[in-house]
Amino acid sequence: MASPSNTRFVIAGATAAQQEAIDTLVKQFVLSDEQLGRVIKEFRRRMEEGLAADGKMLKMIPSYVTRRPTGNETGAYFAIDLGGTNLRVLRVELDGKGGAKTEHQKFTLTEEAKSRTLFDFIAQCVETFLDDRNLRPTGHQSVIQMGFTFSYPVDQTSINSGTLIQWTKGLNVPGCVGRDVVRLLQDALLRLGLRVKVVALVNDSVGTLLSAAYSNPPSQMGIIFGTGTNAAFYEKVDSLTKWKGPSPASGEMVLSIEWGAFDSDEFGCLPYTQHDIKLDRKSINPRKQAYEKMISGMYLGEVARNVLLWMTDQRLFLNGRSSEIFNAMWSIDTSYLSSAVVDSSPDLAEIQQLIEKTMNVPDSTIIDRQIFKVVATLVGERSARLSAIGLTATLLKRPDILEHPVNIGIDGSMYEHFPNFGSIMASTVSRFLTEAQFKNVTFSLAKDGSGVGAAIIAMLAALPED
């Protein structure tokens, strides 16, 4: 995307030093088409590597999902959706017309679950959901079949098994890496005597794709832009040269790109700033999930906090004043940036509240609030532009599909709630496709894609083989 006019980021009344610091940030955070084009090219190269062999930067993991829903399927199916901060248990009723009615219960992951007891915690949540609705099967009733959306990198070995590659998004439960997560969950369910069988292990982006495809059959990609980020797409099995299994009747399979790991370890391609490097160095997984850390909801508030502290240290923000809260990692949530970007009140009252009450730094000036708004805008808009890189590279990987209407289902808080995220992302994609190609592309909010999608894949897993 061409650099926007710098007048957008000129703060009336700012000192020369303050404006100079803002101008430096604009140079770092506003990315040109040329910069993005280079990264897209490298992303494509890394995709090809991952299709050819295991253990590459982009893992291109086979999901074992080889069918597409028609939108005509009916029935009630169950799912567990484990995200970065919450867990949901769902009952999904498919109406046969591309629509689904869901009933779900949300549970917040406890610190103990995140660090020690995750699978027993999940099993207890399933028990609560079934018992509260009198749905728990007794001895003479059929076993409940569930899909399990697991939003972390796994090496999937069948439709209902996969070994954990690494934890991301703040989870770090010992003794799980290298083990089958379905087995770990199934054992926890058995310990509670629950007649529940996990029939499908689903990556959240794969679930989003299948959910989008049930309501919109030309769906080709499913993407998560939320706490973390990933994407899945339908690929020809012939292009998946590392695949040693039987060729499915459909000739295609959904692959999970695991694109949050793009440029990890090497740090040689993405346009990092000192603020990104600082975040990475202090994170629980240094030099991992490099792309995710630049575009995802879990991290953007911390990137912005690093920028604001950099200005504070030069006495260019809040006259050099800070607070215990402001100094603490992760104390600025990405939702604060969303609120700041849309604050159009004359005195920027929402931002004043954030600085003085939430961050506990009193007596902010209107210039301080304008600086906060500019930083929030720069960090958010960079995220949207960078998000277009993986999307564009994946579409260009399958130019054949761009000759026909193609839908991209997207779920996640960044896409749904961050101001202008979707429009900036789409506009950036349009700059790298021909006009005819881009006309065929639609973007849809696959609301609750990861939950509904897991139930749909459980339904597909129960169908007889072709």
Image (cartoon, rainbow, N blue to C red):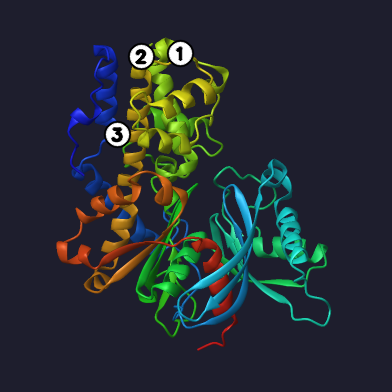
Task: Identify the amino acid type marked 3.
Answer: Phe
Q: Quadrant of the N terminus?
A: top left
Q: Is residue 124 above or below residue 371?
A: below
Coordinates of residue 89 in the picture (x, y in percent): 65, 61
Is 343 in front, or is 9? Answer: 343
Residue in the picture at 19% in, 29% down = 6
Residue that badge 1 annotates: 363
Say which mark, if any, is on residue 404. none
Mark 3, other Cα within 10 Å: few <14 / some 14–19 / many ≥20: many
Res. 42 visible in picture: no
Q: Quadrant of residue 341?
A: top left
First-in-chain label (3 vs 1): 3
Per the image, label 3 sits on a secondary structure element best described as helix
Residue that badge 2 annotates: 316
Left/right placement of residue 320 relative to residue 95 reads left
Task: Identify the amino acid type marked 1.
Answer: Asp
Task: Identify the amino acid type marked 2.
Answer: Leu
First-in-chain label (2 vs 1): 2
Mark 2, other Cα within 10 Å: few <14 / some 14–19 / many ≥20: many
Residue in the picture at 72% in, 46% down = 116
Residue that badge 3 annotates: 29
First-in-chain label (2 vs 3): 3
Mark 1, other Cα within 10 Å: few <14 / some 14–19 / many ≥20: few
Left/right placement of residue 255 relative to residue 460 reads left
Residue in the picture at 55% in, 56% down = 151
Which circle, 2 or 3, is nearer the viewer? 2
Which circle, 2 or 1, is nearer the viewer? 1
